[in-house]
Image: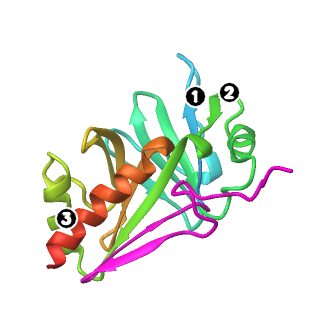
Amino acid sequence: MPDLTPLTALGHDQPQSVTYGNLTMGDCPDLALASLALRRDAPVPLPFGLDLPGPGGYVASAEVAAIWTGPRQWMIEAKAKGCTDFAAQVKAQAPDAIVTEQTDGWAAFDITSPDGAAIGRLLEKLVNIDPGTVSPGTASRTSLHHMNVLLVRPDPCCLRIWVGRSFAGSLWHAVIGAAGRQAA
């Protein structure tokens, strides 16, 4: 009989976490993700009461957030809904939109620190963008060690990195290596 135990993107049965100095990185398997795209003349919805952000924007309520990913396109993320049919919930909120489930295709990692500047110094080592442009309330699509990632800054003390699930181990290795060198 096959073992059907659910695993995180890093292949473990529990989320992983590691701390170097004042930086902590952990995977976030409880987050759900769905894409939302609008048809040509469709009105902009207010899913879960969120005003969908413009270019480079990120807006959040207590449980749900929206990330701008392109013209008339967003990713909608939700806390504690990783094992639900989140796309159906988004579709109910935006019935005229094109909604697709993304939770199993992406993996999220949070880097936290009581010192937001430490996150900025880590970003300088990882991506070729000005860390100042990844300020709270923003999202940027870029590459990190040849991987396409979505950087989200929910607040000054947290950076969330979304990456294709098949690259989760590579991202983990790259970020904890850079954090370890920064802490040394």
Residue 178 locus on image (x, y percent): 21, 63
Residue occupying the point 15% across, 47% down: 129
Foreground residue among 49 and 90: 90
Q: Residue at x 78, y 54 (%)?
A: 4
The amino acid beneath tag 3 is Leu
Contact between marks 1 and 2 (CB within 8 A): the answer is yes
- Hey, which quadrant is residue 121 in on the image? bottom left
Q: Amino acid at mark 1?
A: Pro
**Relative to 134, residue 44 above or below:** above
Q: Main secondary structure of the magenta part?
A: loop
Q: Residue at x 33, y 58 (%)?
A: 173
Regarding residue 132, the answer to whether it shows in the image is no
In the image, which disc is placed on residue 122?
3
- Relative to 134, is 11 on the left or the right? right
Q: Position of residue 122 (x, y in %)?
A: 19, 64
Q: Which residue does the numbered mark 1 point to in the structure image? A: 43
Q: Is residue 164 visible from the viewing direction of this image?
A: yes
Whether label 1 touches label 3, CB < 8 Å: no
Q: Earlier in the sequence, mark 1 or mark 3?
A: 1
Give the residue at mark 2.
96
Judge from the rendering whether residue 75 lies leftward or rightward of residue 179; answer left or right: right
Q: Nearer the viewer, mark 2 or mark 3?
A: 3
